Image: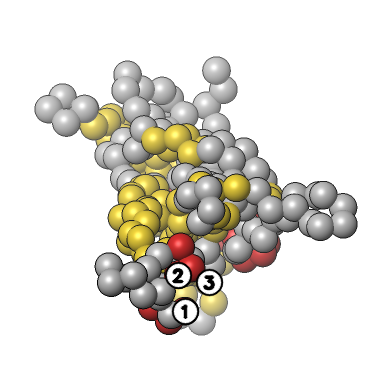
Amino acid sequence: MACIWSPTIDCAEEQGSCTEEYDEEFGILSAQVVLRCLYINRHALASDICGNRRPYPKGSAGPTPVALRASIAGTDTAGFTDEQGIFPLHALVTIQYSSKLKDQYSESIEPTVEFQDLDYRNFKWSSGAKLCEDEHPAFLVRGMNLCRSEVDLTEVQVSIPELTTLAGHVNAAPYTSSLLGRSFAAETLLYHAPVINRKVNSLNIAKFDVSKKWSINYNGWNRYYRAKTNAYEVIVHGLTGVEFKCYPVSSMTAILPP
């Protein structure tokens, strides 16, 4: 298997510079390597390897370490001088890898409670008097929100158009949360507007933290409570008989990965 440290920046491993350290108690493998590159490419190399969390290419017994930190030093190879500065021809970039686990996403459930109004005409007071319209009773509807937080996403991983335009839509396909062990049928998850935070690190690499929320309706968001039958039913258009869907149905694969 080819050993590639960076697929975009030319570099070469320094002889005897690659070291590995294994922490048996926590199952963490740390590794370090010194890479030689042109001095003018030193920052690009560090940015490519660490910014993209390049995996350690020499393999491991457990989880693969990824690049976390870099340090840069010049060599004694003559390059050129400029006023008071010396610019060597090559740089030595030390890359540190670790398999220490870091949360990338989390999912949680938030219980919710709301009241559903009932038709006042179906009730009367114990005295026999009829209820007025503003005296209608209600019943308690318990629900939940599905919340998902994702951190340190790259620009490639963030689907900005889908994140913003799918608000108010419901899921076209069933979804199973592998973290929570819960399954949700089609049209039971109503997507809300997300919170998107963009951050830029010292290497000028942009990352995103995204918080998403879906309200859960196990009866289906496009079914409506009918007091006469005490059930949730479908409503159709009077002239065409086509089912009326208040909430558009869309694929959410881009924002709700398995």
Give percent across and percent down for residue 148: 42, 52
Q: Residue at x 31, y 55 (%)?
A: 111
Give percent across and percent down for residue 248: 69, 56
Q: Residue at x 53, y 48 (%)?
A: 229
Label 3, secondary structure: give it. strand
Do residues under tags 2 and 3 come within 8 Å of each other at their CB atoms? no
The quarter in which the N terminus is drawn is top right
Above or below residue 247? Residue 172 is: above
The label number, if any, that marks residue 120 in the structure image: 2
Do residues under tags 2 and 1 come within 8 Å of each other at their CB atoms? yes
Q: Nearer the viewer, residue 148 or 117?
A: 117
Image quadrant assignment for residue 142: bottom left
Q: Residue at x 48, y 68 (%)?
A: 121
Mark 1 Cα within 10 Å, few/some/many (few <14, many 20+)? few
- Which residue, given by chain and number where applicable, does mark 1 sit on? 133
Q: Nearer the viewer, mark 1 or mark 3?
A: 1
Above or below residue 136? Residue 76 is: above
Spatial separation of the CA atoms under disc 1 and disc 3: 88 Å
Q: Name the residue type under label 3.
A: Thr
Going by the image, does 47 lie left or right of 16? Answer: right
Give percent across and percent down for residue 242: 81, 49
Q: Residue at x 55, y 32 (%)?
A: 4
Q: Name the residue type under label 2.
A: Tyr
Label 1, secondary structure: give it. helix
- Which residue, given by chain and number where applicable, does mark 3 sit on? 81
Spatial separation of the CA atoms under disc 2 and disc 1: 6 Å
Above or below residue 107? Residue 199 is: below
Mark 2 Cα within 10 Å, few/some/many (few <14, many 20+)? some
Question: Sequence-wise, which precedes: disc 1 or disc 3?
Answer: 3
